[in-house]
Image: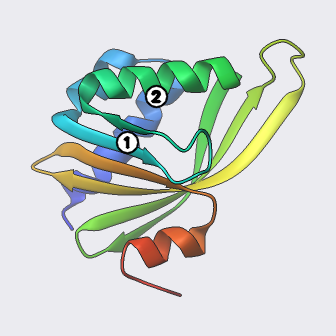
């Protein structure tokens, strides 16, 4: 795995935290897919338009979102990212915290695939590695 791939993943989270959708889309391959494995809404999203839809759904579910990157694990051609998502209930403003694990596939400096899992173990198994 190249350092460029790790930099792309970090840049995705940094851009998300800034609310910088333009940079997220610039880092996403036109054929990008986002696959939620029954964690948020269980839906798959395709292409850059799908990324916009996924981000919009996230914004409806959580207000004032931010991601804290806890761990990055290289697994061959994929990167497993353990994250803590912080936000607020959109109406109640009650603080919400969730821990999720993402599996990224980066190709030629572009995000090609993001899979969302509830646990680190599920993500590692999906990426072909178990700890």
Quadrant containing the N terminus is bottom left
Q: Residues within 10 Å of mark 2 (few under 14, many from 20)?
A: many
Q: Is residue 61 left or right of residue 114?
A: right
Disc 1: which residue: 34
In terms of image quadrants, where is residue 97? top right
Disc 2: which residue: 54
Q: Which mark is residue 43?
A: none
Please report the residue visible at 23 percent of the width from the left and 59 percent of the height from the top.
3
Q: Secondary structure at mark 2?
A: helix
Identify whether 43 is placed above or below 84.
above
Nearest the eye: 101 or 33:
33
Identify whether 91 is placed above or below 116.
above
Please report the residue visible at 46 percent of the width from the left and 28 percent of the height from the top.
54
Q: Secondary structure at mark 1?
A: strand
Could you tell me if residue 64 is visible in this image? no
Say if mark 2 contacts mark 1, CB within 8 Å.
Answer: yes
Q: Earlier in the sequence, mark 2 or mark 1?
A: 1
């Amino acid at each position: 795995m190249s350092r460029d791939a790790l930099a792309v993943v970090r840049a995705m989270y940094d851009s998300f935290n800034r609310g910088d959708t333009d940079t997220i889309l610039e880092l996403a391959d036109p054929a990008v897919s986002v696959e939620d494995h029954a964690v948020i809404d269980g839906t798959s999203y395709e292409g850059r338009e799908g990324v916009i839809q996924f981000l919009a759904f996230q914004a409806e579910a959580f207000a004032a979102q931010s991601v804290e990157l806890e761990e990055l694990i290289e697994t061959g051609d994929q990167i497993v990212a353990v994250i803590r998502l912080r936000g607020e209930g959109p109406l109640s403003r009650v603080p919400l915290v969730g821990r999720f694990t993402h599996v990224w596939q980066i190709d030629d400096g572009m995000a090609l695939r993001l899979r969302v899992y509830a646990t680190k173990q599920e993500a590692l198994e999906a990426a072909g590695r178990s700890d």
